[in-house]
Image: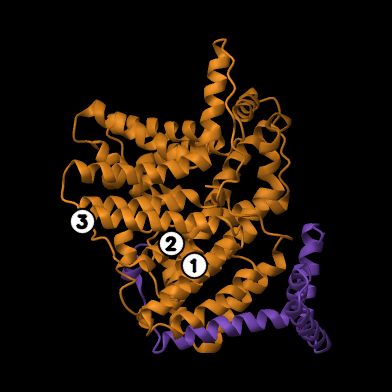
Amino acid sequence: MLKTNPPDLAPPSPPQPLRTSAFVVYATLALLALTIPQSLVGWLQDKNSSELQEIMLKGANVLQRVSQQTGIAIPYQRARDFFLAATGKTDD
Amino acid sequence: MLFPTIDFALFFAVVFPITWLLNGYNTWKKCFLVAASYFFYAFWRLDFTLLLFASSLGNYLMALALGRLKDGAARRTLFWAAIAGNLGLLGYFKYYNFFVASFVNALEAIGFKVEIGFIEVALPIAISFVTFHALSYIIDVYRGVLKPTTSLLDILFYISFFPHLIAGPIVRANKFLAQTVGPRDPANIRLGQSIFLILGGLFKKVIIANYLSTNFVDDIFRDPAANSSLDLIFGMYGYSLLIYCDFSAYTDIAIGVANLLGYEFPQNFNYPYRAISVQDFWRRWHMSLSSWLRDYLYIPLGGSRFGTLATFRNIMITMMLGGLWHGASWNFLLWGGLHGAALVIERAFGQTGQADAVRRSPAATALRWFVTFQFVSVAWVFFRASSTDTWLAYFSTLFSGANWSTSITPFVAVIFVLGALSHIIPPRWFETWEARYDRASLPVKILVPFVVIFLISVAAPNGIAPFIYFQF
């Protein structure tokens, strides 16, 4: 999917590319953590037990509860269920 | 650490701001990026970071010595010692058991029985890429193209920089070291292009490559004789799409990630299955490896300067060694040999594509594309087969033509179509989308990657298989 030499195609940079890039990176990660919190919880559960892991896991569980109670997690769950039903696949 | 994982997302979330915060303190920034890269590598195995360090240190010292010596026997000897050291390391870990087994088998075939010990050691991940980066540096210094750097930190950084460390693209030393001399300009970040490379890479790896592999191709190659001829044909095309989507995904993400950190990597793929000759294919596939082989192997062997037969010999040697670079197996050698033979035939008949294509009719071009794609796809069977028996069974069953049923499900058919789109969508579409993205407001800039990754997560299989090129 790559094109010709990158410099030839370089579009005009946004005025503050670094600040914009930082916003994009962190906001995307935050939105993903909020809308798919179970992946963060599952990922942390798979890690070796340590003090840091337990603290992070508690935080992720809180995030998951908030996400579920406010309904933010619902679109992902519905979309995932629909995908699994449509393709006949399972989450196992 | 795999790119499409939470591990990497968090790793990058830490590395990205610290890199730019240290941008005004170049030495500290490089120290930090080396530490981050070693951490990235140690995620797989800690002890082989020592090997990475030893290789970097050895090449740094050798290059310094090469830079100080005047042309003569001593310099030549040192150069060949450096080459032997790098290839020896690669040979020990990657090829020792293969050559020993081949030697023992050959002797047994003529009635001799010998016992030579095998080494039991894990193959260090990415050792082929590390070696080729190191060789690029040593050869350029020997040729006088590049002055040896006095900074060990720069060499540690060049060889270990995490975006290219595991599976390329192979970045030339002179191109990379030029980027290490001072702070990087944030204006060089091409956000739209980087984001699209990363998103496209995630889609190709997580959706297309993973599903093609686990839902179809792996089963076909596990026991080719148990499949129909039609499925074996689809398996061949499926693997063509799979290996492209898998490998180009890695390098696309690597290029995008490196650019977000302010560094430039070379392009590695350019619609390879649109090639209209095998030579054209190698101008589009794993471009950083094919140009490396051309500049550091084919041309030093004599290239096309010493007559037709010598040219053919040089092509065959280059392609067979290029095949063997991928792994210690006769199948890789055979795969490289097939491509070499095709390049020789094209050269013999003056059919090398590209420049002469404009003079041909669309039908002739289409025919050339068709023949090239069939050849490349057939050759991938040798590349993918786990043994000689596997590809023998594959082709004998395929050509038996006994069974023309198919086990392809509608879901796998959709994945095939999505994979094919990677070559059907014209490049200008991506350029237009990137330009629009760069002009969009900040909320849209955030929403695009969020929505795409969200949708990829919805359709993602559980667990991500390692990238195919990790083993090389």
Which residue has dot 2 on it?
Answer: A2
Asked if marks 3 and 1 touch (Cβ < 8 Å), the reply is no
Name the one closer to the observer, B185 or B104.
B104
Earlier in the chain: of badge 3 and badge 1, it is 3
Horizontal side of residue B313 vs B221, given as left or right: left
Q: Which corner quadrant of the image does residue B193 belong to?
A: bottom left
Q: Colour of chain B?
A: orange
Q: Using the image, name the chain to which the residue with label 1 belongs.
A: B
Query: In the picture, residue B114 is in which quadrant?
Result: top right
Q: Is residue B421 among what the camera can see?
A: yes
Q: Which residue is mark 1?
A: B197
Instruction: Describe the element under mark 3 as helix, strand or loop.
Output: helix
Dot 2, crowdedness within 10 Å: few (<14), some or many (≥20)?
many
- Across and down, in percent, residue B187 comes to 36, 82
Task: Describe residue B7's horizontal placement relative to residue A61 as left or right.
Answer: left
Residue B269 can be seen in this image: no
The CA distance from mark 1 to mark 2 is 8 Å
Looking at the rendered structure, the kind of residue marked 3 is Arg
Q: Position of residue B467 (x, y in %)?
A: 58, 54
Above or below: residue B36 compared with residue B165: below
Q: Which residue is mark 3?
A: B68
State yes or no: discs 1 and 2 in contact (Cβ < 8 Å).
yes
Query: Of helix, strand and loop, which one carries label 1?
Result: helix
Residue B250's place in the image compared with B196, above or below, is above
Which chain is depicted purple? A
Residue at 52%, 47% in the rendered image: B472
Q: How many marks?
A: 3
